[in-house]
Amino acid sequence: MRVGLALPQYGRFADPAVTLRVAAEAEAMGFDSLWVGDRLLLPTAPRDRYVSRDGVVPTEYENFLDPLTLLAAVAATTSRARLGTSTLNALWQPPALLARTVTTLDQLSGGRIDLGIGAGWSRDEYQAAGVPWAGRGARLEETLDVLDAFWADGHLVAHEGPLWTVPESVVRARPVQRPRPPVLLAGLVPAAFTRVARRADGWLAVGLPLPALTATIASIRKQAGSYGRDPDALRFPLRINPHVTTEKADPAHVPHTGTVGQLADYARTVDGVVDEMFADFQQTAGSVDEYLDLAGELLAALRR
């Protein structure tokens, strides 16, 4: 199983110098991938429940750096690790512009971009971005259509749909990865799983109980086969956002809470169900040194 690390970019870690330091040291340690997330603002009175057990939006989100800008800097200062978004709120920008940005990032990184995108959860952020909250599923479908149009072989691009029209145009820039950078979709509802099976390159998994995680991935694989796609070609990177403790936590709370050893044991448990696990220590580390120490401890524990 591949092992990745979420790059620090929010809260006390919202400093590009910190992001670049961790990226360089994590790649040197041997991490296979580096990931960034996406938040726009922290409403003082959120209209939507946050996607966590307590439903409370972390206060660290009041200071959040732009993911794609950071990836450009990380792409230029690393050479081996894959670079991913988990999860980019792709619907906040026109897909033609997103296609150009991701193409540039893929060229800049030498073909190392994994585009993880989702529909988001906060109607407050949608309002601030000037994008309708209703119809997110259809907007995501057409976004994927436009991306595919821009990344297809040849140099002519055209698209006509309910939301966007791209007149037939010459666009010669293409990503390094063919036929496109891997597109990984997030979501925890049946329609999202079906969309992954039908047209994505994988699902951005989360730390569900093992039976639920296994059943969800099995369902996506089965649906992919029903669409004539190769289920074994799909990818399933799993994100964990642990609160790391020094004393062993209740096993029922792992991987949300636990020691580094418990996190490593959890990774071994899901190995074979998912093909990659990456950890975000931004809500448990108190400093960049502690962040790197936790990352190194986890990698060492997995290697033992």
Image: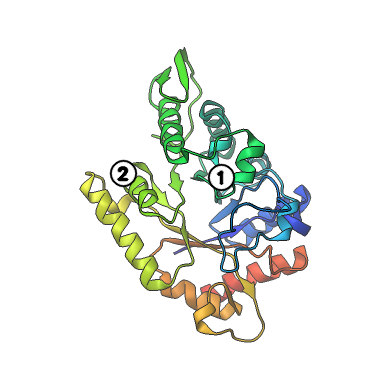
Sort mark 1 into few (<14), some (14-19) or many (20+) by Cα contacts within 10 Å.
many
x and y percentages locating residue 206 in the rendered image: 48, 62
Please name the residue that numbered disc 2 is placed on: 198
The residue positioned 54% from the left and 80% from the top of the image is 262
x and y percentages locating residue 33 in the rendered image: 55, 54
Q: Quadrant of residue 125?
A: top right
Q: Is residue 155 above or below residue 88?
A: above
The residue positioned 76% from the left and 63% from the top of the image is 288
x and y percentages locating residue 81 in the rendered image: 56, 51
Image quarter where the N terminus lies is bottom left
Residue 304 in sight: no
Q: Which labelled disc corresponds to residue 88? A: 1
Q: Which amino acid, by three-letter code, is at mark 2?
A: Arg
In this picture the colour scheme is rainbow
Q: Is residue 235 above or below residue 182?
A: below
Q: Quadrant of residue 188?
A: bottom left
